[in-house]
């Protein structure tokens, strides 16, 4: 959202302004679904060269703002991002395999415990409460604070 209340799919597009093709509405009239869907469809469009890739579905090739910044369009992936994703997946798989083989409790808890999102939220609420009682600024990221606020656990 920009300082006048105009909405964009990502903070990267704000600089383009409310008359750009990236503005999807404003706080007074809401989101223009037609524009939002047009941008979403372009972002999710199958990218050239991705059809048979083994990391398709895990790759960050649907990040519209990254694509836009590097190729000038949200529906094309830069060769640098493509190579980076392919390298990153190999490293992530190697690390994941090692942690799994070691039965690493934190790794298993985060990736294989279905209750992890709820437990994590409770832990965040406890951390926020501790920060508050010790008069410290909250150490939590803003999305976590927003979830806590929407659950009525804290004020925004
Ligand atoms: S790694 Fe490259 S080819 Fe594979 S899905 Fe990502 S962008 Fe497409």
Image (spheres, rainbow, N blue to C red):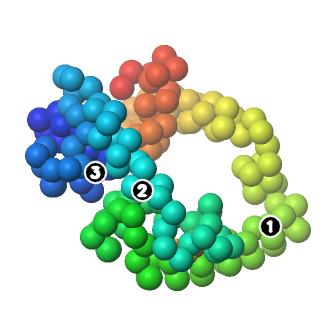
Looking at the picture, how far across and down is residue 80, in whole percent? Answer: 44, 82
Q: CA distance from mark 1 to mark 3?
A: 35 Å
Looking at the picture, how far across and down is residue 96, in whole percent? Answer: 75, 67
Q: Which of the two labelled residues, at mark 1 and mark 3, occupies the earlier sequence position?
A: 3
Which disc number belongs to residue 11?
A: 3
Placement of 66 over or under 41, stated as above or below: below
Which residue is pictured at 60% across the width and 81% down the height?
87
Q: Which residue is mark 2?
A: 43
Residue 25 in view:
yes
**Callout 2: helix, strand or loop?**
helix
Residue behind label 2 places its C-beta within 8 angstroms of ligand 1: no
Q: CA distance from mark 2 to mark 1?
A: 33 Å
Which residue is pictured at 48% across the width and 17% down the height?
152
**Looking at this view, is 142 or 2 the one in front?**
2
Q: How many marks?
A: 3
Which disc number belongs to residue 13?
A: none
Q: Quadrant of the N terminus?
A: top left
On the picture, is 83 further left or further right than 57?
left
Q: Residues within 10 Å of mark 1 (few under 14, many from 20)?
A: some
Q: CA distance from mark 2 to mark 3?
A: 16 Å
Which residue is pictured at 87% across the width and 61% down the height?
103
Q: For ligand 1, which image quadrant applies?
A: bottom right
Looking at the picture, how far across and down is residue 49, in whole percent? Answer: 53, 77
Placement of 6 over or under 153, stated as above or below: below
Q: Please name which of the two marks, 1 or 3, marks the residue nearer to the observer.
A: 3
Quadrant for residue 91, please give it.
bottom right
Q: Which residue is mark 1?
A: 99
Q: Which of the two labelled residues, at mark 2 and mark 1, occupies the earlier sequence position?
A: 2
């Amino acid at each position: 959202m920009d300082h006048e209340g105009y909405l964009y799919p990502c903070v990267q597009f704000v600089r383009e302004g409310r008359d750009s093709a990236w503005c999807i509405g404003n706080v007074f009239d809401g989101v223009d679904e037609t524009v939002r869907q047009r941008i979403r469809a372009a972002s999710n469009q199958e990218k050239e060269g991705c059809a048979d890739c083994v990391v398709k579905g895990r790759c960050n090739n649907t990040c519209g703002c990254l694509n836009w910044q590097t190729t000038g369009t949200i529906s094309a992936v830069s060769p640098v991002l493509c190579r980076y994703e392919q390298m990153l997946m190999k490293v992530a798989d190697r690390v994941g395999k090692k942690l799994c083989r070691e039965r690493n409790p934190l790794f298993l808890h985060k990736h294989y415990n279905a209750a992890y999102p709820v437990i994590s939220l409770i832990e965040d609420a406890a951390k926020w409460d501790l920060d508050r009682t010790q008069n410290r600024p909250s150490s939590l990221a803003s999305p976590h604070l927003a979830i806590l606020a929407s659950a009525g656990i804290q004020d925004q």
